């Protein structure tokens, strides 16, 4: 309930200059949270509006349910909010229509997910891809080769780095699992062979070197385990990059983009998740709130985020700038793969996306913990996807 409590501190009185008092809810995801606060402060100085920043955790549904409770009573306490793409179907009806950005400025497929019922309700702000963080004591001679990487994990010493922490900067394991599915050439969850291949890769890479007591299923828990020296590798989203790099073991860490399942670098789809910024339609200062959302997702602010924190932008032109591409390998690879980027299928499953995500997450966790084999897990996921599709249609 932290979001609700902090939001009550908003001052609702307007200044003599008719400056607006806005409340911005930032996602508490690593460096993205810090940059959100900095961006809000810059907007306040330039515009004369007051911006009060509160925090929201995207891991789990607590923050989402807090938003729903506020919106159900048409509360004006939150003006601008950040959210993962998976929340759009649940929040879309209570978000204001935003102006379209200039044609061709956003990465392919990213902007479309920000629509609800034909309206643009979320402006994309940061892109995240799946990464492997490897400790130097388990790296093979060629960590970029998937087979060598898997062999390195499974030959990890039993004392010290003896497992693999599993994390994702999203509400469930579903986006990360989909990343693996698309990486082996699947066109969708109905592709049984590709689905099974992805599950077997997960089982080989994670389940065989992990016990249920070692596995972590939240981003922060995985990072904590990894940096404390308990685990051999960390699977996470690119938003965790700076947090790991600033840890005590940074000098012993190698960052590897999650390899394509068939070794087809640059040709297989690269699934990405996206943070969006939207405006509550219950805001009492909708014009100023829209200005804040546009400012935070602007090309200039995304350039600052990339250079200062390594956050991947959604403005296509930024990937033509050498200074941006030199920040880290993640930004360079995204720039080289813009035509292969695949957004999560949120628009396909609508409001059922989160329920499907929970079903898939539970099935994958059972498999990783040795409670189900890949074939059985495939059947569970197929049934869940079929059920979600029927509910949409």
Image: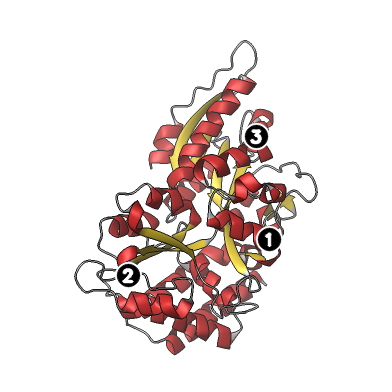
| Marks 3 and 2, the one that precedes in the sequence | 2
Total labels drawn? 3
Q: CA distance from mark 3 to mark 2?
A: 43 Å
Q: CA distance from mark 2 to mark 1?
A: 32 Å
Identify the image quadrant of the C terminus.
bottom right
Check disc 1 and report its element: helix, strand or loop.
helix
Residue shown at the point (42%, 75%) measured from the top left: 149
Q: Which residue is mark 3?
A: 295
Q: Are marks 3 and 2 in contact (CB under 8 Å)?
A: no
Viewer-proximal residue among 183 and 366: 183
Horizontal relation, residue 304 to residue 3: left or right: right
Residue 204 quadrant: bottom left
**Percent x, y for residue 207?**
35, 78
Q: Residues within 10 Å of mark 1 (few under 14, many from 20)?
A: some
Residue 94 quadrant: top right
Q: Nearer the viewer, mark 1 or mark 3?
A: 1
Check disc 2 and report its element: helix, strand or loop.
helix
Check disc 3 and report its element: helix, strand or loop.
helix
Q: Are marks 2 and 1 in contact (CB under 8 Å)?
A: no
| Marks 2 and 1, the one that precedes in the sequence | 2
Residue shown at the point (35%, 75%) measured from the top left: 153
Q: Nearer the viewer, mark 3 or mark 2?
A: 2
Q: Residues within 10 Å of mark 3 (few under 14, many from 20)?
A: some
Q: Which residue is mark 1?
A: 338
Color scheme of the displayed model: secondary structure
Horizontal relation, residue 95 to residue 218: left or right: right
Q: Which residue is mark 2?
A: 138
Residue 178: image tag: none
**Percent x, y for residue 230?**
25, 63
Above or below, 214 against 33 in this view is below
| Marks 1 and 3, the one that precedes in the sequence | 3
């Amino acid at each position: 309930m932290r979001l609700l409590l902090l939001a009550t501190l908003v001052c609702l009185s307007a200044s003599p200059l008719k400056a607006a008092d806005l409340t911005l809810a930032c996602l508490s995801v690593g460096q993205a949270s810090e940059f959100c606060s900095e961006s809000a402060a810059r907007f306040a100085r330039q515009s004369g509006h007051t911006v009060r920043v509160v925090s929201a955790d995207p891991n789990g549904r607590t923050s989402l349910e807090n938003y729903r409770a506020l919106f159900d009573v048409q509360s004006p306490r939150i003006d601008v909010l950040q959210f993962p793409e998976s929340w759009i179907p649940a929040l879309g009806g209570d978000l204001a229509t935003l102006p379209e950005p200039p044609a061709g400025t956003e990465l392919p497929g990213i902007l479309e997910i920000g629509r609800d019922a034909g309206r643009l309700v979320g402006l994309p702000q940061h892109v995240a891809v799946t990464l492997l963080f490897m400790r130097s004591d388990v790296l093979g001679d060629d960590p970029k080769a998937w087979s060598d990487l898997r062999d390195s994990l499974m030959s990890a010493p039993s004392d010290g780095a003896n497992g693999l922490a599993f994390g994702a900067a999203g509400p469930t394991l579903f986006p990360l699992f989909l990343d693996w599915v698309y990486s082996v050439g699947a066109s969708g969850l109905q592709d049984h062979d590709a689905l099974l291949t992805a599950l077997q890769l997960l089982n080989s890479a994670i389940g065989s070197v992990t016990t249920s007591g070692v596995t972590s299923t939240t981003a922060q828990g995985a990072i904590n385990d990894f940096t404390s020296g308990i685990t051999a590798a960390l699977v996470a989203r690119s938003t965790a990059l700076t947090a790991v790099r600033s840890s005590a073991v940074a000098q012993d860490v190698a960052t590897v983009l999650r390899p394509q399942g068939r070794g087809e670098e640059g040709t297989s789809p690269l699934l990405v998740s996206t943070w969006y910024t939207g405006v509550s339609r219950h805001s009492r200062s909708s014009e100023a709130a829209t200005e804040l959302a546009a400012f935070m997702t602007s090309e200039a602010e995304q350039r600052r985020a990339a250079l200062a924190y390594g956050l991947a932008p959604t403005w296509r032109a930024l990937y033509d700038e050498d200074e941006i591409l030199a920040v880290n390998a993640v930004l360079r690879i995204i720039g080289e793969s813009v035509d292969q980027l695949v957004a999560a299928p949120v628009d396909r499953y609508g409001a059922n996306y989160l329920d499907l995500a929970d079903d898939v997450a539970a099935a994958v966790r059972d498999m990783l913990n040795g409670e189900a084999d890949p074939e059985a897990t495939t059947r569970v996921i197929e049934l869940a996807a079929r059920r979600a599709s029927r509910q949409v249609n």
